[in-house]
């Protein structure tokens, strides 16, 4: 329940608007999580990085800031994660 002043009417959430909010949150999580997961995996599988910031710096220097090659399948990954 949302606490609002008594003279303000709050429309109830419809299933459609609730689903849209869930999908937006899910997409944001996928987009934000992929780069962090890439850094985590590189730290776990390689000993060439001192820490996470070193990994990010070297990754940007070597690979540049671009769409991760794994993101070519991002729409399929995202839609497979939808409720």
Image: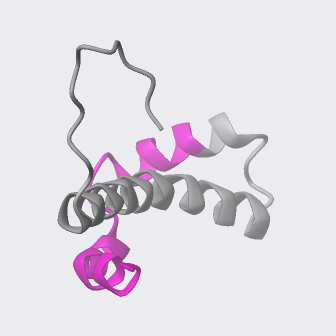
Q: Is residue 74 above or below residue 60?
A: below
What percent of the width, then of the height, locates residue 6?
32, 15
Q: Is residue 26 left or right of residue 47?
A: left
Q: Is residue 2 above or below residue 63?
A: above
Quarter location, residue 81: bottom left
Residue at position x 20%, y 58% in the image: 17
Q: Is residue 6 covered in magenta?
A: no
Q: Residue at x 79, y 41 (%)?
A: 50
Which x, y percent locates residue 22? 35, 61
Q: Nearer the viewer, residue 6 or 56?
A: 6
- In the image, residue 13 above or below residue 82: above
The spot of residue 52 in percent (x, y) is 69, 41
- In the rendered image, the residue lying farthest to the front is 6
Q: Quadrant of residue 30?
A: bottom left
Of residues 81 and 39, the one drawn nearer to the viewer in this rendering: 81
* Quarter of the C terminus within the rendering: bottom left
Colouring convention used in this rendered image of the protein: one colour
Start-end of magenta stretch: 56-83
> On the picture, is 18 further left or further right than 3?
left
Give whichever of 70, 75 is nearer the camera.
75
The residue at the point 24 percent across, 14 percent down is: 7
Residue at image point 29% right, 81% down: 79
Principal secondary structure, stretch drawn in magenta:
helix
Residue 62 sits inside the magenta stretch: yes
């Amino acid at each position: 329940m949302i606490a609002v002043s008594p003279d303000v009417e709050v429309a109830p959430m419809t299933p459609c608007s609730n689903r849209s909010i869930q999908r937006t949150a899910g997409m944001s999580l996928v987009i934000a999580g992929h780069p962090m997961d890439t850094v985590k995996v590189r730290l776990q599988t390689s000993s060439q990085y001192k820490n996470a910031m070193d990994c990010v710096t070297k990754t940007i220097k070597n690979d540049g800031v671009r769409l991760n090659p794994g993101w070519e399948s991002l729409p399929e990954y995202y839609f497979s994660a939808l409720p």
